[in-house]
Image: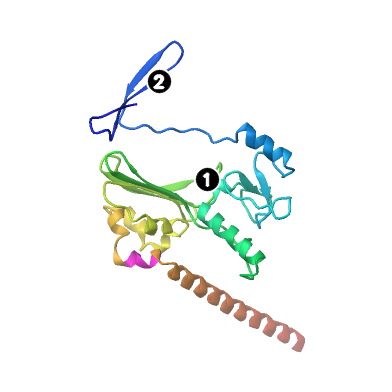
């Protein structure tokens, strides 16, 4: 690698083989390579009697087929069952996976009663970093979005451009935000914005209509308005869940009462 004068940027990268050399001028270098299990770990897993098929196989409580041996992370996967769309841990938020492992161990130690290992995984996966030129980048997505799917159509809502910065939302056919990407030379409030993933656009102050009428010039400013602040609070979502539960219970109560009256009416007849 050839760096600039203050050694903060890449100016040129050179690739050399046995009989040739090529030099390419560039501003940045990104290396993408598939992560694989090396031979030592592969044979170690096979010889240890752990259930291994390219991934360490665990149940919903992260237990392997050997007692007291737990596993989690990109090299592990769940047993195929009704709780998971896909089994590989790499398609779920690593912090959420780690929290579930901690809860499982605390339950085993008697610290908590319920480890909630069968609850749905909902926390988004995200990457937040600073690119050359002091540009900040954020990408967040709902769990298992990267898993290959066919026949799924999505709508893109975006403002800005690749030169000056942009904000992009990816919305599925149900109206749920499945991914977002942000690029800006200003600070990005990533801890707030990742909470938008998995939420329905109906919660975003009539955003679909505003886009149709071109009344949202900048999504960064839009999601920094006072109306959006509750979206970033965990208490707000808990309140919504409690309200929904009470509503559903009330509807079910009315339904049960209606069925009871119908049955009594039929008996009287």
- Percent x, y of residue 84: 63, 53
Residue occupying the point 72% across, 86% down: 264
SS for callout 2: strand
Q: Can residue 53 be seen in this view?
A: no
Return the residue found at the far left.
5
**Left or right: 106 as drawn, with respect to 163:** right
Task: Compute the Cα span from label 1 to label 2.
Answer: 40 Å
Identified at 51% across, 55% down, the residue is 95
Give the labeled residue for mark 2.
15
Picture layout, residue 116 above or below residue 264: above
Q: What residue appears at the point 34 percent right and 64 percent down from the top-left corner?
A: 228
Question: To which quarter of the image does residue 193 belong?
Answer: bottom left
The answer to whether 159 appears left or right of 108 in the picture is left
Who comes first in sequence, dot 1 or dot 2?
Answer: 2
* Residue drawn at the location 75% of the way across and 89% of the way down: 268
Query: Measured from the top left, where is residue 31 in percent x and y?
Result: 43, 32
Q: Residues within 10 Å of mark 1 (few under 14, many from 20)?
A: few
Task: Answer whether residue 253 is magenta in the image.
Answer: no
The magenta segment: 227-231
Q: Nearer the viewer, mark 1 or mark 2?
A: 2
Q: Bin the neighbour count of mark 2 within 10 Å (Cα to Cα): few under 14, some 14-19, many 20 and up.
A: few
């Amino acid at each position: 690698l050839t760096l600039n004068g203050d050694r903060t940027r890449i100016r040129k990268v050179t690739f050399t083989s046995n009989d040739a050399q090529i030099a390419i001028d560039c501003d940045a270098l990104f290396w993408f390579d598939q992560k694989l299990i090396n031979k030592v770990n592969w044979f170690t897993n096979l010889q240890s009697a752990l259930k291994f098929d390219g991934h360490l196989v665990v149940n919903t409580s992260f237990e392997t087929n050997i007692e007291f041996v737990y596993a989690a992370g990109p090299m592990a996967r769940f047993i195929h069952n009704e709780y998971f769309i896909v089994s590989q841990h790499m398609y779920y938020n690593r912090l959420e996976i780690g929290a579930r492992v901690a809860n499982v161990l605390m339950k085993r130690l008697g610290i908590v009663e319920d480890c909630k290992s069968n609850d749905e995984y909902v926390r988004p996966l995200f990457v937040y970093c600073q690119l050359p030129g002091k540009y900040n980048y954020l990408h967040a997505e709902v769990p298992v979005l990267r898993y290959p799917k066919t026949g799924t159509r999505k709508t893109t809502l975006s403002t800005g451009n690749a030169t000056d910065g942009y904000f992009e939302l990816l919305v599925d056919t149900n109206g749920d935000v499945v991914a977002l990407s942000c690029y800006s030379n200003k600070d990005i409030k990533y801890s707030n914005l990742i909470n938008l993933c998995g939420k329905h656009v109906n919660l975003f102050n009539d955003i679909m209509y505003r886009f149709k009428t071109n009344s949202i010039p900048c999504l960064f400013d839009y999601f920094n308005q006072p109306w959006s602040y509750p979206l970033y609070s965990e208490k707000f979502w808990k309140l919504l869940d409690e309200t929904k539960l009470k509503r559903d219970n009330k509807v079910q109560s009315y339904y049960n009462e209606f069925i009871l009256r119908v049955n009594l009416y039929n008996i009287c007849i």
